[in-house]
Image (cartoon, rainbow, N blue to C red):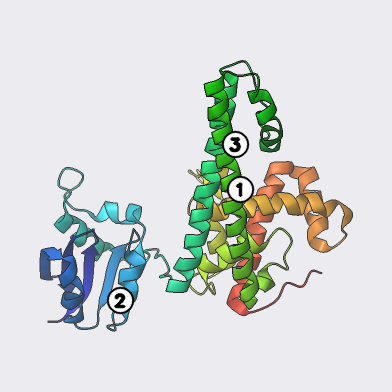
Amino acid sequence: MTIVFVGIDLAKNVFALHGVDDAGKARLVRPAVRRDQLLETVAKLPPCTIGMEACSGAHHWARQFMAFGHTVRLMAPKFVVPYRMSGKRGKNDAADAAAICEAVQRPNMRFVPVKSELAQARLAVHTVRQGLVAGRTATINRLRGVLSEFGQVMPLKAKTVRLEAATRAEALPQWAQTACMDLLAEIRRLDEQIAAYDQHIRLMAQADERSQRLMGMPGIGPTTASALLAAIGNGHDFASGRQVAAWLGLVPGQYSSGGKNRLGHITKAGDSYLRTLLILGARAALAAAGGKHDRISRWAQALAERRGYWKAVVAIAAKNARMAWAMLAKGEAFTPA
């Protein structure tokens, strides 16, 4: 009997494979396959469904395996854990591969879309930019900390720190002045790098017609448009815009029981970077809605008055995610009523 499903536990150098036939009987058990042998081993298999956890290198291997005619399904690791028969105490690579093989067969399993090389390259630009932003924030806080040690307490606003830190540092001892000047120089260097990456993102967004259509929506700029396009592509891996909003964690969590519906805070599941971009864009859209009279702006203003500012912001972000999916999946442009 031929192998129908295969689970692969990914690693850096040694991989584990577990394959079963259509009756569920194990036909391929390879607990240790070296990295240079993996492609050859998979190429010899008949076309089947391969399951893997969505971790580092998963999208690269998925593209390689799909070239051999296999169907590849990526899953979040948290969805695979319940299928590990040996539990926490018996965790090993072979048990993980068997759990992945079992999980990929579930009819209601949720899968991660396989990204193309271009999409991964675009997301790499966003990842590096976020790292630079985090490094700049840490450097600014480090500078404020050094100044506060000598009684110079700076406000939280980064612009004020850039303008006044050099003047405040003049009252400090020589070695402290040296440290503050070096930190200011590092902040300027990071500013230049972040500006360069912002330009890269603008070029990416302008080069793709789909990103240009997304930027026609209120609250979506070049950064959000290029990140959305790189993350969900044409949106064909989602059945509806509601699934996209739920995938981004922009829907309320349910705590329902006994026939009584209880909705709590948003789940904050999925991609936190995309969710943050959509929330920031929603804040800008709500701020600009005051002088507009189109249907969406009037809805946003009425919602903010009725339910409060932050609930309106989250609702706008969720609506933008759903409309973005519709535009990508159907190839339509944004036409405000």
Q: Determine which quarter of the picture holds residue 19.
A: bottom left
Task: Please report whichever mark, 1 or 3, sits nearer to the chain's N-terminal start.
Answer: 3
Q: Position of residue 291 (x, y in %)?
A: 88, 54
Q: Nearer the viewer, mark 2 or mark 1?
A: 1
Q: Position of residue 15 (x, y in %)?
A: 18, 62
Q: Determine which quarter of the picture holds residue 159.
A: top right
Q: Give the camera-side residue of 298 and 45.
A: 45
User: Mark 1 to mark 3: distance in Å?
Assistant: 11 Å
Q: In this figure, which residue is indicated by the disc labeled 3?
A: 184
The numbered mark at residue 64 is 2
Q: In this figure, which residue is indicated by the disc labeled 1?
A: 191
User: Mark 2 to mark 1: distance in Å?
Assistant: 38 Å
User: Mark 3 to mark 2: distance in Å?
Assistant: 46 Å
Question: Circle 3 — which element?
Answer: helix
Q: Give the camera-side residue of 178 and 295.
A: 178
Q: Nearer the viewer, mark 1 or mark 3?
A: 3
Question: Circle 1 — which element?
Answer: helix
Look at the numbered discs 2 and 1 and tell me whether their residues touch, using CB distance below 8 Å: no
